[in-house]
Image: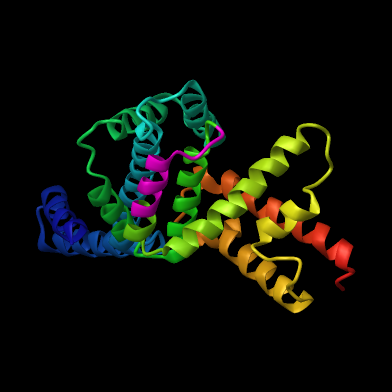
Amino acid sequence: MWGKVLGTIFGYMLTKHIVGALLGCYIGHRFDRSLAQKFAEQGGFSKFFVNKAAFTKQAVFFHAVFSVYGHIAKASGKVTAQEIQAASMLMDQMGLRGERRSEAQRAFSEGKSSDFPLEQTLKDFKRSAFGQRDILRFFLEVQLQAAFADGELHSKEREILYTVARTLGFSVADIERLLQQLEAQMHYHRQNGAAQSGPSLKDAYSILGVSESDDDKTIKRAWRKLMSEHHPDKLAAKGLPKEMLDIANQKAQDIQVAYEQVKKQRKIS
C-alpha cells in the first residue's frame, strides 16, 4: 500500500503531471506486490508470532528446569557440592554459555528459596508445553537426575518429586517406575566408567521397565514405546529445546543398548 502512495507522490513531483503520478502509482503497486509475496514466502506475521511463541516457550522451559532443580537440591536442607556439580554438568551438556548460563544459575538459586512457588512454576511449564506427555515426562526425568545427584534420594526430595509428578499429571506408580529405570541407568554409567561394555542384564531389564519373567513380545513392545517416547527428533518436533537434545539422545542410546543386551541373551529376532 505504501509503495503505491509514495510512488504516486514521487511520480507527480518528478513530472508535475498526472501521467507521472499514475506511472509512479503503478511502480509502487508492483513494489507492494513483490514485497508482500516475499513476506508471505518467509511465513509472514504468522512466522513472527510462532518464533516469538517458541522463544517464550523455551524461556519457560529453561526457567522451570533449573528452578525446580534448585528446589529439589535444597530439599534435604543443604545443597551439596555434588548437586552443584550436577547442575553445572547439565548446563555444560546443554551448551549454555554467557547470559544463558547466568539465567540458568539465577533460576537454580531462585529455586532454593523457601518461598519458591513450585506448583505455580510447574503449572506454567505444563501450560507452555501444551500438556504434551512426552515433554512432561522428559522434564520429570531430568528432575529425577537432580534428586540422585548426590547418590541418594532423601525423603524430602521424594516428597517434592511426588508433587512434581502429580502436578504434571503422573501417578506415584509412574514415578516409581521412572526411579527404577534411572537407578539402573546411573548404575550402568558408573560401571561403564570401569570399562564395562554394556549394562548388566539386571540393569538392562530395569532400564526397559520390564522383568525377566516377561515374554519377548512384552519386552519388544516396551522397548518400542520407550524409544518412541525418547526419540530426539520426535521430542524436538514437540518443542523440546535443541539444547536438551543431547540428553534425549543419551537416554535413547541407553534404551537401545539395554534392549540389545536383553535381545542377545534371549535370542530375540
**Measured along the vertical axis of the image, is residue 234 above or below residue 86?**
below
Magenta includes 260? no
Task: State the residue at coordinates (33%, 53%).
Answer: 163
**Measured along the vertical axis of the image, is residue 83 above or below residue 165?**
above
Q: Please tell me in which quadrant of the rendered image residue 247 appears.
A: top right
Coordinates of residue 108 in the picture (x, y in percent):
35, 32
Task: State the residue at coordinates (72%, 52%).
Answer: 203
Q: Is residue 235 left or right of residue 106?
A: right
Q: Please tell me in which quadrant of the rendered image residue 23 appears.
A: bottom left
Coordinates of residue 129 in the picture (x, y in percent):
36, 59
Query: Would residue 68 be seen by someone viewing this image from the given angle?
Result: yes
**Measured along the vertical axis of the image, is residue 69 above or below residue 173?**
above
Chosen colour scheme: rainbow
Extent of the magenta region: 151-163
Task: State the residue at coordinates (34%, 40%).
Answer: 63
Coordinates of residue 141 in the picture (x, y in percent):
50, 50
Quadrant of the snapshot with the C terminus: bottom right
Q: Is residue 119 left or right of residue 266?
A: left
Task: State the residue at coordinates (61%, 60%).
Answer: 231
Q: Is residue 254 left or right of residue 108?
A: right
Query: Would residue 238 be seen by someone viewing this image from the given angle?
Result: no
Q: Is residue 170 left or right of residue 125?
A: right
The secondary structure that dominates the magenta segment is: helix
Q: Depth check: 18 or 239 in front? A: 239
Coordinates of residue 53 in the picture (x, y in percent):
31, 54
Quadrant of the snapshot with the N terminus: bottom left
Magenta includes 162? yes
